[in-house]
Amino acid sequence: SVNPDLASERQTASFSVEKLTALLDGGAEQTRIRRAVVEAIESDPVFSRENQYFQTQNERYEAAVRKAVHLQKKMHEMGWTENGPEYKYIYRALSGDVAFLLHRVFMRSISVLGSDKQIAKWIPLATQHKLIGSYAQTELGHGTYLQGLETTAVFDTATQEFILNTPKISAMKWWPGDMGRSATHTVVFAQLYVHGKCYGIHPFIVQIRSLQDHSLCPGITAGDIGPKMNFEHIDNGYLLLKNVHIPRENMLSKFCEVRPDGTYVRQGSQKINYFTMTTVRISLISDEVLTPLMKACTIAIRYSVVRRQSKLKPGEQEAKILDYQTQQEKLLPQLAAAYAFHFINDYLQELFNRGYREIQRKNFDMLPELHALSSGFKAVITQHCTAGVEICLRACGGHGYSLLSGLPSLYTKILASCIYEGENTVLLLQTARFLIKCFMAASAGQPVPPSVTYLAAVKNGKCPAKNKLDFLSPDIYTEAYQHVAVRLTSSTAAKLQDLIQSGVKKHDAWNQCTVQLVQAAKAHCHYIAVKNFAETVEKLETKAGIQKIMKHLCDLFALHGIFSNTGAFLHDGYTSAAQMDMVTASYLDLLAVIRKDAVPLVDAFDFTDKSLNSALGSYDGQVYPRLYEWAQKSPTNQMSPAYERYLKPLLHNTLSKL
Amino acid sequence: SVNPDLASERQTASFSVEKLTALLDGGAEQTRIRRAVVEAIESDPVFSRENQYFQTQNERYEAAVRKAVHLQKKMHEMGWTENGPEYKYIYRALSGDVAFLLHRVFMRSISVLGSDKQIAKWIPLATQHKLIGSYAQTELGHGTYLQGLETTAVFDTATQEFILNTPKISAMKWWPGDMGRSATHTVVFAQLYVHGKCYGIHPFIVQIRSLQDHSLCPGITAGDIGPKMNFEHIDNGYLLLKNVHIPRENMLSKFCEVRPDGTYVRQGSQKINYFTMTTVRISLISDEVLTPLMKACTIAIRYSVVRRQSKLKPGEQEAKILDYQTQQEKLLPQLAAAYAFHFINDYLQELFNRGYREIQRKNFDMLPELHALSSGFKAVITQHCTAGVEICLRACGGHGYSLLSGLPSLYTKILASCIYEGENTVLLLQTARFLIKCFMAASAGQPVPPSVTYLAAVKNGKCPAKNKLDFLSPDIYTEAYQHVAVRLTSSTAAKLQDLIQSGVKKHDAWNQCTVQLVQAAKAHCHYIAVKNFAETVEKLETKAGIQKIMKHLCDLFALHGIFSNTGAFLHDGYTSAAQMDMVTASYLDLLAVIRKDAVPLVDAFDFTDKSLNSALGSYDGQVYPRLYEWAQKSPTNQMSPAYERYLKPLLHNTLSKL
């Protein structure tokens, strides 16, 4: 039975939840396929996450390996294939709690970087799981800056082998997933030396564990790097190489080859590889970043209509906490952001598919823009969504702090997305570099890629809004965002120029502008996200009920961004103080409007109770009985030796005799 | 041996680290006492935290109990007493990892709320640990709003007993520390009923476990609420009461008593009790909030001079990451905040001591102001410091995400401080209510407490700064902060008035202003913190070297607040856009200045390696060897059954036969 406080929220939905779900899925047929996958996975006890919050790191790892192995069987049973329509829903249905994800990265590396011969040899072995692969790039002392990697691979013409070494402790491979305990092979990135000359970073296939008994191979030291904030189920590992010999054929050689006599040959273009990095950043957004935020919104919003606290009106029942403006102001902007980023993700996917088609036709023109967009949006979305999950957690008070709410594990996991696949500040500076370059080009009348043509059209006007309703016009707020993005880019470009002209060296000048460059990159992405949301809403004209609520969310997303960052809009007077008061008024009004549909809007994300795994967020809203039921299962409710050892002597007053 | 990259940072300190440490401690003698306590605790193997990051919740609990019991012995051995000068350093030296903290709250409750007779009976029992106490206030469905508690205590004149019940599941006691597994007694807050009439919330001493064998008493259901983000060492518990009979004498009766015939008598003033709540909020700031931020700054800043990444100048060695402006902009404002809040904590402590003296003289005039300040600063400092620790964690990239860095546990623990002892938003609204009241009074020419007299002096001037150096003048920025605080309070008061005059009911009008009221309360506290820091710096005139660096930190704290919140200062034109550019320039300049002293500034916090318990933050900066050494000890490097069970069959290709 559904908690009546939650049930009542669903009776007044202004739109069809089922239709919105289909829109989010990309069609009703996709919804059907997704639900079938979820049903198949969740009904299988091997994939259960029931005791997840009570498990140790060791238990989590073992469960993840068990699930990964069972998944092979399951896919076979269900007739799911890696190219089938079900595939993309499997990982989401497992909530990511599965091992051997790096095995796929291992295979992708070989497919992209390997020669035809290498692909023919290794891919079938990997596909049949005759080996377990990993991907060893990051080192203890080296992350984002790949050129700094210190592992060496020296070619020995006599034996036709590469000899790999970890020259010092900072060069140990550190973090690779699946490597600490599972992998038998890994792709090692190392500085290639031939005849004493360094040719830079290259990838090598290295066997690290015996295929017979899993013991470490000669010269290999490897293990698990220990506890982390999350990802307990993954055996992130370390790897130390001491005179490890591998055959010449194990250097991945699609683009570079070392001939038997030691001749180094570079062939083909590595640009496609560069493109791979950018697509990884986009591909992680959906499952690793948006899903956690959508889950957190679902949990926090359902809880906020079940939890009652204090009286809003004297003499009445205690109020649902979602009726408080401050609670709305915490949660509803996160909900709007989840929708905004869902739509920008669609946009980026589409753009990258187009880019991929161009690249296959050997046209690499789109690469710089794609790199800038993928870097910027990876950073902005992970940052925004991580903050959003944290807000949801805190908004549930004490119960949000319990692991049983599901929120702590969502938070500790999404937090990692700000760091992996490119640290966010580094990525934003990549975007900024592109913006500055394009701004200079545009100022000089040269053509620039589509997403930045707006930089050329610097207008010095004023925001034309006359009353608070004007700020519900996408034209008004989109233009305000555009203005800010142009201003931040142009002013930072000017500062950079001034510094250089005043004699500061180029790299120093760049460093002195980086705080502001980061702001410019964020403003650029924020502008594109707002514009894209507004355009998406416009295209929903055939779906009246949904268009209306999406319009409200779009407005909220845009106005929340202005309200939270008023200085950027006020700075040069584009927006006046009076207009800012209108923004505030419209923004606060919107909270009360969207609050009415808050539960249907999270219901549309269509998470099952099992996938939420939250005592606060279930569909039926039975928060308190579930918290009690789950707590009773905790291992901390088993008898503790602490009583006999410490408490009994204390209480029986033997303390003085100690 | 100290890592040379770290050692070089210490050679150029612009001030005496030892003298700054003494200043922070409140004198060299205090430093000496603190170090002696730390040394005694850290040299005792029973208090070791060596394996903390590898332990399960059960192991953490058992260790905390062991330490709590051992502490009694240690105090006796060392001659430390609860009233001695060493006492306040013990908890900090243990890094909080100790059980029975609620036992002290239990005792304080009885001391404050109990009659002389009750104190005479219970306090000696508790002091001698003949019982273990807890404090059961919060319920599953009720937190901050105490009047909403549902547990009942019905007086039965026939038996002269109170009969306690948990009428429904939302009334279960939930969260009390030390109650899940340890406590034998607890103070239960329940609605008192006599002859069918409800007299509201009252405290009752209830025995929950046998003193003989620790079994639950009749009518009691109790246990542990399970895993949380942190506080694994504490057995936060649940408690369900079913017709639990306790004698009439167990209602704490300093202020209210039920006579044998059921007559309810209220006596004395409860105001002192109200004062107790406010002092708890202040007392937690130092150990629970400032210490974690100071530790996080120490770890992140030391790591940032050891870690090198990318080249700042072409052809040179990779740069220390603290040399990047973006890294400085992440960490140095947190360092400045740690100092700012240390000094405001001194100010609040002093104010509360004065308040306590007044209250002892039956003068309660200071109470509203103390309540507003304690609520507001509890919220602002916990929020700011929690965000600061998260920034430090993220600024260390992947290694920050490892538990071995110490940062995740600092973060997950400090986060709770935003929720406990009053949820922050609720507290800020209490401060705001005080501000609005005082603003109205001041506008009507009535006297107001000292901390808010500035609200009366509304000036409509402009910021007089003419160049970026002017923004290094405390008068300039303090006045800017004051202006913003006044503007936000007065404009929200006006909005509230307008709404009420337009016919909106008072409570609705209040709710519609709460987002802005929260802003006003924050601005008020921020202003006081800046003003206090500036005044503290001024008083350091006898300590030239220290005064200079503290002045830089004060400037940074103030300018960072403006830079991060430009809209508030630009809004009504008090600060112009040109002035805001000066703020930005001065702010960025300061980063480079303070960066030089960053390591000495964290060294002055004087944390031992054991108390930091961080592979990244040790005094010697041997980051990589220590990470490797610690990782090897992780239980995840023991043999896993996963190989035999899952990997071996998979690799030996029995999958197809499954």
Image: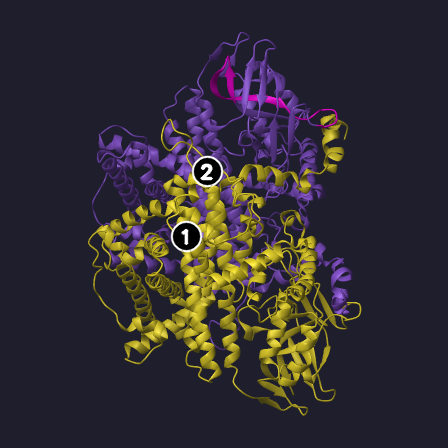
Chain colours: A yellow, B purple
For mark 1, what is the residue?
A: A16
Label 2, label 1: how far apart the Cα atoms are? 20 Å
- Which disc is residue A5 wearing? 2
Label 2: element kind? helix
As rendered, which of B473 and B364 lies closer to the eye? B364
Mark nearest the camera among 2 and 1 is 1
Q: Is residue A251 above or below residue A406?
A: below
Residues at marks 2 and 1 touching, judged by CB atoms closer than 8 Å: no
Residue B468 visible in rendering:
no
Which amino acid type is marked by label 1? Answer: Ser
What is the magenta range? B191-215
Outermost top residue: B261
Regarding residue B641, the answer to whether it shows in the image is yes
Q: Position of residue B534 (x, y in %)?
A: 36, 45
The quarter holding residue B352 reads top left
Work out which quarter of the rendered image holds the C terminus of chain A and state it: top right
Task: Name the residue type under label 2.
Answer: Asp
Tell me the chain of label 2. A
Q: Position of residue A405 (x, y in %)?
A: 55, 45
- x and y percent of residue A124 in the render? 68, 77
Structural crowding at the residue carrying mark 2, measured as other residues with C-alpha within 10 Å and reported as few (<14), some (14–19) or many (≥20): some
Picture layout, residue B47 above or below residue A142: above
